[in-house]
Amino acid sequence: MNILFDADAIQRRIGELAAEIEAGYPPDEDVHLVGVLKGGFVFMADLVRAMGTRVTLDFIAVSSYQQSTKSSGEVRLIKDVDARLEGRHVIIVEDIVDTGLTLTYLQDILRARAPKSLRTACLLSKPSRRLVDVKVEYIGFTIEDKFVIGYGLDFAEKYRNLPHIAVMDEA
Ligand code: IMP
Ligand code: MG
């Protein structure tokens, strides 16, 4: 297994992202993070702990009908957020932006709830795979077109618990 980012490198980058995010909002205004299940749960957990106290959080779950290492493009809402987003500074927290279809769908449905602002944070981005031009304000690492696992990211629901991000072996 080829390790792309070890646990220390991920934590360092998350510290930088947290500082960047906090600097981007007025100090007296709260920020509401919406984590995308399941892949985004580890990133979300570390990101909120790297941020100050003015943070609240919620989760949303989508399925991209993914059978293997390629997504089909169809996105389905499995679990909605619990709390209203109206008037809040909302940040979508996702593991990876690949084709961009999942995030485009999420941004569309969350923007319709009239948040005060809507931004997106992704730990990873694969720009060479993009099918739609989606705006992602905060990106941890840009990677090549390789299927990656670990740190929340799965292959057939496995490997989410790896502390690092690795390239999946071509079997
Ligand atoms: P998109 O809609 O094509 O941008 O892809 C979104 C979803 O596909 C992500 O939230 C991941 O769940 C999954 N995905 C894309 N690339 C990878 C990868 O390299 N490893 C694991 N999951 C991936
Ligand atoms: Mg995902």
Image (cartoon, helix red, strand yellow):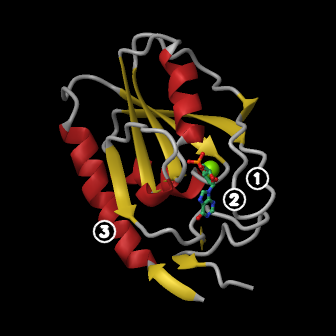
Given residues 101 and 51, the one toward you in this image is 101
Residue that badge 1 annotates? 66
> Is 89 situated above or below 9?
above
- Residue 100's x, y, as percent? 52, 43
Identify the image quadrant of residue 14: bottom left
Specify few, some or many for label 1: CA neighbours under 10 Å numbering under 14, 14-19, or 20 or more.
some
- Residue 61's x, y, as percent? 69, 38
Which three-letter amino acid code belongs to the residue tagged 3?
A: Arg
Q: Secondary structure at mark 1?
A: loop
Q: Nearer the viewer, mark 2 or mark 3?
A: 2
- Residue 78's x, y, as percent? 77, 33
Which three-letter amino acid code belongs to the residue tagged 1?
A: Gln
Q: Secondary structure at mark 3?
A: helix
Specify few, some or many for label 2: CA neighbours under 10 Å numbering under 14, 14-19, or 20 or more.
few
Q: Which mark is residue 12?
A: 3
Q: Secondary structure at mark 2?
A: loop
Pointer 2 with pointer 3, Cβ within 8 A: no
Which residue does the image show at 54% across and 88% down from the upper left?
Answer: 2
Residue that badge 2 annotates? 70
